[in-house]
Image (spheres, helix red, strand yellow):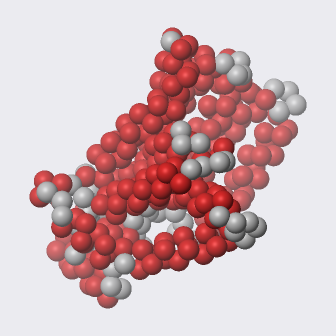
Amino acid sequence: MYTDEDLQQAVDKEIFSPASVEKFRAYIHQRDNTHYADEEGFKLITSFNDIFVVIACLLLLLSAAWVVQGVSVPLALAVVATLSWGLAEFFVLRRKMALPAIVLLNTFVGSVFAGMVLLVGFPDEKAFMVAGFVATVAAWLHWRRFHVPITVAAGAATAVAFILASLVLTFPGLKEYLNTMMFLGGIAMFILAMRWDIADLRRVSGKSDVAFWLHLAAAPLIVHPVFSNLGIFEGNQSALDLALVLGLYLMLTVVSLIIDRRAFMVSSLIYVLVALTELLDTYGLVGDSFAYVGVVIGFSLLLLSGFWHKSRRILTAQLPASWQSRVPLVS
């Protein structure tokens, strides 16, 4: 088992020529009737040993935290962060294991953030501001050391938390506009994700993995404020509200197809399910309406998946040439 990164390293060491590797990739994609850039691949697991190591790491981290938490919860979180870094030194830096890298990054940054919140004082905007700043620095240090793709998304998320908490602390009146600020933070993360995407349109390097996680983190920040302002979970939706939800979901689907990222569709899926369920309930299909909606939406998503390449080809062909050069194209 080898990855595109392994192939690139072989090219760098002059074991293979760039042309031969490119021909090999083209052959594999043609054989499997796929286009690599259009499959939105990312490194998650290399073997079952990844799962085995993750289970062992979590067992160690949870047990260590349980032993120390009787003395101090912040101290227990500091122990988790320290152990997470130490384990990453071997399993990430030396063994290059994908899934443990993701899990250990999350336990490291998450422990730093939660520990700082508890130290400063929860709940309090000042606590989230300090925690966001320290966690962002921690994520940056982790990136400098290990270069785990998800680290950039984690650092961006904590930076957004730091900025929002700072603004609310400085201007308390902004708390009423938290959804709007979350939306703007999501847009900023989306722009950052697109910068990483544009740097690797063929999606053969780690930059594509960084962009994947950034899109995944940005999508909820964009989608949740928009749909929550419509009062989806408050009930008594009008037909206009439901039509608006479907229209927004269609727009997000188009965006997902153009940039070839499915994160927005996944993030907004729960809102569409709830909205359509309420619509059926309003017209008397009570009880099994969610199941009916699930069948329709599930079938639609599978249909879209089957025609994803063709749909992208049609959409991207309508874009200006300058835009087409900034999104992955279907061969």
Extreme residue toward the left, this view: 321
Q: Quadrant of residue 100?
A: bottom right
Please provide percent x and percent y for residue 328: 26, 63
The correct choice, above or below, for 179 with respect to 250 in the image is above
Please provide percent x and percent y for residue 256: 37, 59
Q: Report whether 197 appears left or right of 240.
A: left
Q: Does residue 184 appear anywhere in the picture?
A: yes
**How many numbered dots are placed on residues in this image?**
0
Q: Residue at x 71, y 18 (%)?
A: 121
Most foreground residue, 247 or 85: 247
Q: Quadrant of residue 283?
A: bottom right
Q: Quadrant of the C terminus?
A: bottom left
Q: Report whether 171 appears left or right of 326.
A: right
Q: Residue at x 47, y 31 (%)?
A: 180
Q: Residue at x 33, y 69 (%)?
A: 38
The correct choice, above or below, for 24 with respect to 181 in the image is below
Q: Does residue 151 appear anywhere in the picture?
A: no
Most foreground residue, 204 or 285: 285
Most foreground residue, 293 or 41: 293
Q: Quadrant of residue 76?
A: top right
The correct choice, above or below, for 298 with respect to 149 in the image is below
Please provide percent x and percent y for residue 149: 44, 50
Extreme residue toward the front, this view: 283
Q: Residue at x 78, y 39 (%)?
A: 65
Please provide percent x and percent y for residue 224: 53, 44
Extreme residue toward the bottom, this view: 31
Extreme residue toward the right, this view: 70
